[in-house]
Amino acid sequence: MKLRIYIILSTLFLADCELMAQSKICISFYNQENLFDTLDTPNKDDAEFLPQGPYAWNSEKYYNKLNNMSTVIAAINKGKGPDFLGMCEVENNLVVSDLANTLAKRNQNYQFIWHDSKDERGIDNALFYKKNLVHAVQSRLYDIHPDSIGGSVTRGLLMADFILKNKSRLVIFVNHWPSRRGGETESEPKRIYVANYLKYLCDSIQKNDPKVHIVLMGDFNDHPDNKSISQHLQAKESAISVGKTDFYNPMFQLLKEGKGSYNHRGNWNFLDQFMLNQNLVSGKGKLSYVNQSAQAFKEDFMLETEEKYKGNPKRTFGGKKYLNGYSDHLPIYMYLQLN
């Protein structure tokens, strides 16, 4: 009996030591730029990324894409890979599973969350996470009704609700908001609607659990100072001014420094962003944001070397020309402290 108790206590002690040894967790987001398989999916407009399509998307290009994306992901967090990774522009659970398996060959082992959205092209959001940090998880997809945004069918809001090993609750929303196709001004009401819906969901969660930690991440197709972000989500430039239902957006400061995750016609900006609720920036809870840790991840191997586009993200295609690159977006990452 004494031996059994000793074994149990030893196991609990070792688990606590493992958690204490990893006092910080790395959270990242990465737009995968059209991670499609080569198969024709019924009721989805994926014709561009089929072998007979304009990109001549075949198995060789697909496996090159998986290897390229996994190379970047594995390099984040000083070569250890992020602990949580949100993604957009993944076609289905098959490509997410293939990417996870490719990362496993690099000793990066992930569980993943994926829900099929109603997006017309079939591009979805997904989330990778390392199981050793997680005690329990629930997830769901909040669809955006087409009638609410002028008849467009778009990606839903992917929510993952984690209980971490230190008993803190972390809710992550992975976003990919409606694009600017048709013009920034003309398409803005769609993103504002999604912002209001997301804010409503977050307010409801925080009302029921005032101690919850919330991270919003994604490709918002708007900049930190656009109305959808700064006014409707109430994402602030300063952590000090964040109220109970507001968010802190660290990309504001990075933008002032001339940094970005996306380059449009020579100008860097942040379509990819993190937003954190008050509990994460107050420093009082079991989980807190590591100040100034949010950054765009950029290594030389990910960038164009051709003089005209030098320093831009090296993408998979430039127009219809196959470049065998990575993504037109840079990943972003940040750290949270386990208290």
Image: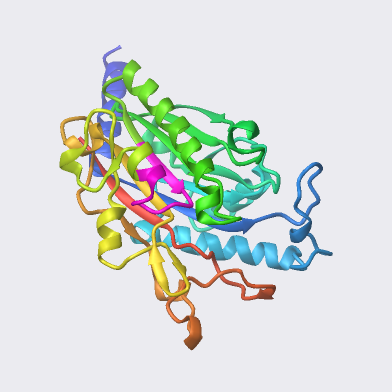
Horizontal and vertical percent position of residue 262: 44, 64
The furthest residue to the front: 186
Q: How many marks?
A: 0
Left or right, 224 with reference to 319: left
Q: Quadrant of the N terminus?
A: top left
Picture layout, residue 226 above or below residue 163: below
Horizontal and vertical percent position of residue 209: 32, 19
Q: Nearer the viewer, residue 113 or 132?
A: 113
Q: Nearer the viewer, residue 242 or 322?
A: 242
Q: Residue at x 60, y 55 (%)?
A: 182
Q: Nearer the viewer, residue 242 or 331?
A: 242
Task: Indicate the colouring scheme.
Answer: rainbow
Horizontal and vertical percent position of residue 172: 41, 36
Picture layout, residue 118 above or below residue 266: above
Horizontal and vertical percent position of residue 302: 47, 71
Left or right, 327 with reference to 39: left
Picture layout, residue 269 above or below residue 132: below
**Is residue 12 visible in the rendered structure shown here?**
yes
Left or right, 258 with reference to 219: left
The furthest residue to the right: 52
Choose top left, top right, bottom left or bottom right for residue 330.
Answer: bottom left
**Is residue 127 visible in the rendered structure shown here?**
no
Q: Is residue 220 magenta?
A: yes
Q: Residue at x 56, y 31 (%)?
A: 141
What are the residue bounds of the magenta stretch? Answer: 215-229
